[in-house]
Image (cartoon, rainbow, N blue to C red):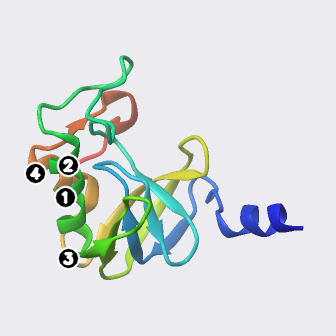
Amino acid sequence: MILPLLLAAVQIVPAGESFQCTPTRVWDGDGPVWCAEGPRLRIAGIAAREADGSCRSNQPCPKATAIQARDALVDVIGSRRGVSREGHVLVTGPTMTCRSEGSAGGSRTAAWCTSPKSGDVSCAMVRTRTVLTWPRYWRNHRC
């Protein structure tokens, strides 16, 4: 009974669909970002260090620390309002408009988002120099 309710709460937005995301939590520099509307985002086209500071062997590895990238993402999409008991940064920010690229693995939707605060979130993150473009996913995206 509880499992179906949990699965319904976290949705993968189908590729190509647009959706709204009001950010509430951030885990690391490329996501997930929890949206008040339900989805959990992975910011499309970029790579950040994992929360433990490591880099996966199959992706670009930026020089910035995981904490620097996470804090940059918080600043790009809103402002910090605390930390959850699980370690997520609690965020308040304006509603973003996003376009899904489909599943990013697990319960995350890969998406290109535009924020009223900073414009194209992927591009804004690249400008912080805390993440790198991931050519495999960046493809022909332009800032």
Residue 67 is tagged as: 2
Q: Amino acid at mark 2?
A: Ile
How many neighbours does mark 4 have within 10 angstroms: few (below 14), some (14-19), or many (20 or more)? some
Point out the tag, 4 or 1, that comes first from the N-terminus.
1
Q: Find residue 33 and report its horizontal and vertical position in percent.
A: 41, 61
* Secondary structure type for disc 1: helix
Whether pointer 4 and pointer 3 mark residues with C-beta atoms closer than 8 Å, the reply is no
The numbered dot on residue 71 is: 1
Instruction: Give whichever of discs 3 and 1 has the lower sequence position.
Output: 1
Tell me the mark number nearer the camera, choosing from 3 and 1. Answer: 1
Q: Amino acid at mark 1?
A: Asp
Task: Say if mark 2 contacts mark 3, CB within 8 Å.
Answer: no
Which residue: 54% across, 53% down?
109
Depth check, mark 4 against mark 2: the one in front is 2
Q: Position of residue 63 (x, y in %)?
A: 12, 31
> How busy is the neighbourhood of tag 2: few (under 14 within 10 Å), some, or many (20 plus)?
some
Numbered label attached to residue 36: none
Give the spatial CA distance, label 4 vs label 3.
Answer: 14 Å
Q: Which mark is drawn over residue 117?
A: 3
